[in-house]
Image: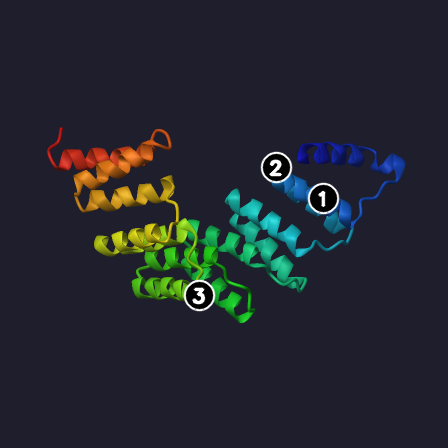
Amino acid sequence: MWCKVIHLWKHMVEMEEANNVVPNHFTYTVVIGSFVKEGLKEAMDVLGKMRTSRLVPEEAMYSGLISLSARHGRMEQTVGLYEEMRAHGIVTSNYTCASLLALYDKSEDYSKALSLFSEMERSRVVIDEVIYGILIRIYGKIGLYDDAQRTFEEIDNMCFLSVEQTYVAMAQVHMNAGNYGKALQVFGLMRSRNVKPLPFSYGALLRCHVAREDLAAAEDVFRALCKYGLPDVFCCNDLLRLYVKLGQL
C-alpha cells in the first residue's frame, strides 16, 4: 500500500513544524522505499531531506534509488548515488551492480561496465547469472566473442544456467558474429534443459531463422509467438522482409 505511505508522508511533512514530528531513519527507509516501488522521482527529494538530517541511507535504500535512476536513464545521478554509497563505506550488493551494468550497457559505455565488473571481482561481490548475462551481451557488442563464449561456459560449469535471458544473450552473440548454427545450438541447449521459452527468446530465434532464410522454421516460430498475442512490429518486419527476399509476395 505504497500510495497510502506516500500520502501519509506528505501529510506528515505539512504538519512537521506545527507538531515537531521529526522523521527518523526508519521513517525515511519506509518512505523512500515506497516512492521507489511506485517508480516516482520524488524519492530523490526525500533523500535530500534525509541528508539534511545527517542520516546515512542503508545499502538497500541506495540500491532502490540507483535502480530507479537507472530506469529513468539518469546516468549522472545513478553514478553519483553509487559513488556516495561507496564514500560511506557501504558494501555494494550484486543487485546494485547489476542496475549500474545494465545502464552502462544501454548507454553503450562499455569501458565503464568492464571497469565496474573488475571492481566487483576485487571487492568480492557475489556475481550472479544476471550479471554474467549482461557481461556476455557486452562482450558480444564489442566483438569479444571468445570472451563471451568462455564466460558462458564458466556459468554452465558453475550450474548457473537457468535464466532464459542468459541463453538468448549468448545466442545473440553468435548471431552478431554470423554463426547462426551455433546460435541454434544454444537455443537447443535451452530447450533440452526445460527452460521455458517466452516471447523474448522466440523473437531472437525468429531473427536467427530469418537470417538463415529458413522460411518454414521462421513461420513455425512466428506461430508460436502468436500464442502469446500479436507479435511486436520487429518480429512482423523480420518475417515480412524474409517473404520479400524469397519472392513470396
Give SS at disc 3.
loop
Of the two numbered discs 2 and 3 on the same chain, state the one appearing first in sequence: 2
Task: Tell me the distance, in whole angstroms, between the alpha carbons under discs 2 and 3.
Answer: 36 Å
What is the x, y in percent for residue 146? 30, 65
| Residue 194 can be seen, yes or no | yes
Residue 161 location, quadrant: bottom left
For the point 80% across and 44% down, the residue is: 23
Asked if 169 appears above or below 126 in the picture, the reply is: above
What is the x, y in percent for residue 30? 72, 44
Please, what is the three-letter code of the amino acid marked with disc 3?
Met
For the point 24% across and 37% down, the residue is: 220
Labels 2, 3: front one: 3
Give SS at disc 2.
loop
Q: Are marks 1 and 3 in contact (CB under 8 Å)?
A: no
Give SS at disc 1.
helix
Indicate the quadrant containing the N terminus: top left, top right, bottom left or bottom right: top right
Of the two numbered discs 1 and 3 on the same chain, state the one appearing first in sequence: 1
Image position of 195 (left or right of 213): right
Labels 1, 3: front one: 3
What is the x, y in percent for residue 129? 46, 57
Query: Which residue is denoted by mark 3 in the rendering?
Result: 158
Residue 3 location, quadrant: top right
For the point 66% across and 44% down, the residue is: 33
Indicate the quadrant containing the C terminus: top left, top right, bottom left or bottom right: top left
Task: Tell me the distance, in whole angstroms, between the alpha carbons under discs 2 and 1.
Answer: 12 Å
Please, what is the three-letter code of the amino acid marked with disc 1?
Val
Query: Which residue is denoted by mark 2 in the rendering?
Result: 38
What is the x, y in percent for residue 175? 26, 52
Query: Which residue is denoted by mark 1 in the rendering?
Result: 30
Task: Tell me the distance, in whole angstroms, between the alpha carbons under discs 1 and 3.
Answer: 37 Å
Please, what is the three-letter code of the amino acid marked with disc 2?
Glu
